Amino acid sequence: MDVTNLESVRDDDFIHAVMEESGQDLTHCYQCGNCTAGCPCGFAYDIQVSQIMRNLQAGRKDKVLNSRSIWLCLSCSSCTTRCPNNIDVARVMDVLRHIARREGRVAERGVTTFWDAFLASVRKHGRVYELGVVANYVARTGRVWTDIDLLPRIAPKGKLSPMPHGIQGRDEIARIFQRYEEERTR
Amino acid sequence: MNLAYYPGCSGLGTSREYERSTRAACTALGVKLTDIPDWSCCGSTPAHALEHALSGALSARNLVGAAKVGCDTVATPCPSCLSNLKTARHRMADDGFRAKVGRLLDQPAEKLADLPDVQSVLETLVTRVGLDAIRAKVRQPLAGLRVAPYYGCIMTRPADVMRFDDPENPTSMDDLLTALGAEVVPFPYKVECCGASYGVTRRDIVARLSGRLLGAARDAGAHAVVVACPLCQMNLDLRQTQVEWPGGRAVDMPVFYFTQLLGRALGVPDAELGLEQLCVDPAIAFRRAAQAVAARQAEEAALAAKAAAKAAQAKQAASANEGGRA
Amino acid sequence: MRIGVFVCHCGSNIGGTVDVPGVAQVARAYPDVVFSSDTMYACSEPGQAAIVDAIREHALDGVVVASCTPRMHEPTFRRTVERAGLNRYMFEMANIREHVSWIGKDREANSNKAAELVRMAVEKLRLNAPLYPKSFDVTKRVLVIGGGVAGIQAALDCADGGIEVVLVERESTIGGKMAKLDKTFPTVDCSSCILGPKMVDVSQHPNIRLYAHAEVEKIGGYVGNFKVDVRRKATYVDWELCTGCGLCMEKCPSKKSPDAFNEHVGVTTSINIPFPQAIPKKAIIDPTSCRQFVKGKCGVCAKVCPTGAIRYDMEDQVVTEEVGAIITATGYDLFDYTRYAEYGGGRYPDVITSLQYERLLSASGPTGGHVKRPSDGKEPKTVVFIQCVGSRDRSVDRPYCSGFCCMYTAKQAVLTKDHIPDSRSYVFYMDIRANGKMYEEFTRRAMEEYGVQYVRGRVSMIVPQGDKYLVRGVDTLLGEQVEVPADLVVLAVGAESSHGAPQLAEKLRISYDNYGFFMESHCKLRPVETNTAGVYLAGACQGPKDIPSSVGQGSAAAAKVLGLFSRGRLESDPQISQVDVRRCVGCGKCITTCPYGAIEWMELRGEMKARVIETVCQGCGICTVTCPQGAIQLQHFTDNQILAEVNALCLS
């Protein structure tokens, strides 16, 4: 393992961006580890959430934004609820995803593909069309066997809509997305 | 006070039975719900994970719609919608955020300063209707039914935004189910995440987390799990065949929406509650409950018989004693 | 008038951002100033000598020193001018350090502000007049509030020093928290064995009067002459007659009274002596559970008491004590751990507090010193200790470190191994704070000799699992989530201020911090004094403290009281209010507003006028702003003096 030069890995602009966008003071973290202790998804993380926080304090942008953990965070707010320093850790994780997406860094492509399929459906219909989202996801990832085992369980229940429930204000929703993209590229 | 209703997209699909039972139960309790006209998706996790203003705009459109029809409160059955709508409203207090959201919407930002309050249908029922009123309307108590109440991770958290019940140990659904005559088992994972929407992309995560919840309900002797969230319900019910059961011992664990049990206790016909749309057969739970009631009755009868026999014996002994003395 | 001005550099503290020689030069032009100079350290010996020399050489009759806060050095310079033959009140101080150099970086602005502060001081000094203190007698008795180890030490030291002590204790026995402990760190000696003799000394010392089960209700007066009302709460047992034989406890049919002494591990009888070494060893009835009180019939204790001491009709009694000084040693309370819902919030019987665990370890405790789980009485084989429960946690408004939990946890882990050799203990900690003599060595022993498993990280959640508890935490040094199936979980609950502490502080007229701990006069140099003369602090009422520190403070507070009483008479502060009877119209407003009751009516040629009781007035000045006639004036802070300062600032 390489020796980490704390001066050269430190990106102060990144630290400030995370603090600014999340509204959370990273210096308040004293590394008790409670966020990691209660994280239901820690078993799947490559970097535990308390170590994400530590890496943020050290300004290690690449390490944090290239992690898989930020995409696997379930947004369940256990970390936020139990932080003894009142840090909204879940919001910090959210903001890390925002920054990573802006920079085109995604270590868990499947997750963002699903989210993108979801939002594409919202943009198109105004409401989510569940079958359409899964179909889109399968088409983009080529994972054709996704949840095929569940089909016989759910099909007879008559719950899945064969058609999207488009709303009248579809254009309004599309405009929200359009303006969002314009703001982003500005 | 006018109550707007925001069903959420899954109510049109995978959580139809939640939607049906919510409306049926509210009707039975005299709660009038005004649908937000032409409501749209809140954006759920995919939106807030991409950008907060986008999420805020998708949510705010619906809150503005509720205000337009004269409602000061919005009720929604889905905790994910609840979380997004409430968070959007909460953050709107920040001028910068409000302006940013305003730029994404057709409406001007000023409209966003005073949006209707948002609450879960659960909160509506326990605070507006009240447990006493509900208890008074119970026609068919859920006698013998042992249930594990599972609230999901975000209905009460983060506490400063959600402002409902205890963030670690909520009890409102426990109290409601108790009022309906059910027996609530101690369930330590009331707010532990089930794996959320990762079922499609990372089945391993849901398999493990939902498996832990189902295992705990099994070990606590629950006949069923009761939920308030479409995603939780899907993970625990539809995906029950995919989960990793702790100790490897799988059981059939019915997973109800709390509104289904509420409706049933209020005497709403099963057909209106969508019980047939659950994957794990709900009859299993009712059968177990009936068995529990029968077993308890048998036990009580045995105890009564034993006591009677003992009393008779004592009486006999006493009369024998007296006879001896005489 | 001939005034001298001395402007201090305070090394670079002031000189760094203020043009000190420039200020001294400007001051020479102020009215009545005949001499000014700058000085490197005015408070140093040569600095003071220069002031004395200047007074003599230039025949000064008033001195201004521009330096630091008067809270530190005003007494110093008053003595300096006195040495040179001036009255000590012919001196003024301008604070150009805390109010200027430490808060601003702009040299020019700082220098201007410093010059203006000097000018204000000069203008006030021009109106100063010599004041002379009066002396008064001292009541050489001391009130000690709180009978924990700090209060006991203070009481014994004062009593041994030959003064009478009134010791007031809220509970029915003295001993405080220490009496509940099984052993003490770092020596692991028996707590009651070392505290017991001191408690006995208290009960037998001829100079100590003990009021147990009593509370301070009202405090009046001032240093040297306080008047204190003590409420002796009803015990329903005549303690003059009670011999502490314990027959009543044996026969009491109501056996489910809350057992506060044992921290509610189990229950006790409604008539009760909390523990065998209690001082006073007297019984007391809990009226909330006693059948005689709740149901109106029982009377068993009255029937069995060999001395006929039971008094169901006893009422509270208020006694008044006169003392010259007060030591408050009211200790601390424990954080309410039920606020941590993730640790069960009180729902899990085998998740207990550290003090409850002490009672389980103690031979005089409810289990006779055998460690048994509250739920099923089984001996635990795996014990998990969680530190910082209610300490270093902003989310529950307890950001401070309680200081002693690391050490008592190490001790309890060691004792666990002693009691149950085949057990294993885990300690979840964030940092080990062992900064006392032999403390670090002790925690190392816990790990090295007793095999206590220290895990660096917090615990997120406790989950009941079968008859065990799954403790889910993190080992941040491993960087992994970890879990331990435990038989018993002990929460190292932090310290918080004693309930009722702020209310007592207000009676004592002393300050307290955001958390209810009493404020010392100076955090380093006056640790047991308060800003109210004659009121002293000892122990954890000032902040969380372990036994050695509490005992040390008890002795320190006693030394302060003995020092105070060693002077035959005390001097009163002449900075008090005075009534100009010619202007007083007898409206009585000052009498009603005075917070100290220091103003009374007097008759003067058939008219009612106000009169200040000099020894009671504290010089707060409230009366002077209340008086519609300007007839009552605070000496050294008259309206004219204050207006002169305002004018100096605004009109110049």
Image (tube, coloured by chain):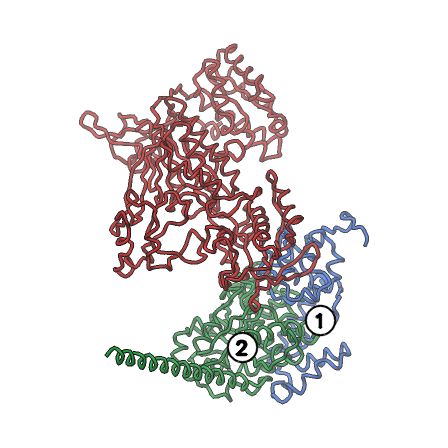
Vertical order, C138 against B240 (above or below): above
SS assignment at label 2: loop
Foreground residue, C212 or C13?
C212
Q: Quadrant of the N terminus of chain C?
A: top left
Q: Colour of chain B?
A: green
Marks 2 and 1: in contact by CB < 8 Å?
no
Q: Nearer the viewer, residue C349 or A146?
A: C349
Crowding at mark 1 (Cα within 10 Å: few <14, some 14-19, many 20+): many
Residue located beneath label 2 in the image: B222
Q: Secondary structure at mark 1?
A: helix
The red-tinted chain is: C
**Mark linked to residue C75:** none
Residue C531, how many percent across, how many down?
44, 34
Residue A137 sits in quarter: bottom right
Q: Colour of chain A?
A: blue
Distance (Cα) linking label 1 and label 2:
34 Å
Camera sees residue A102: no
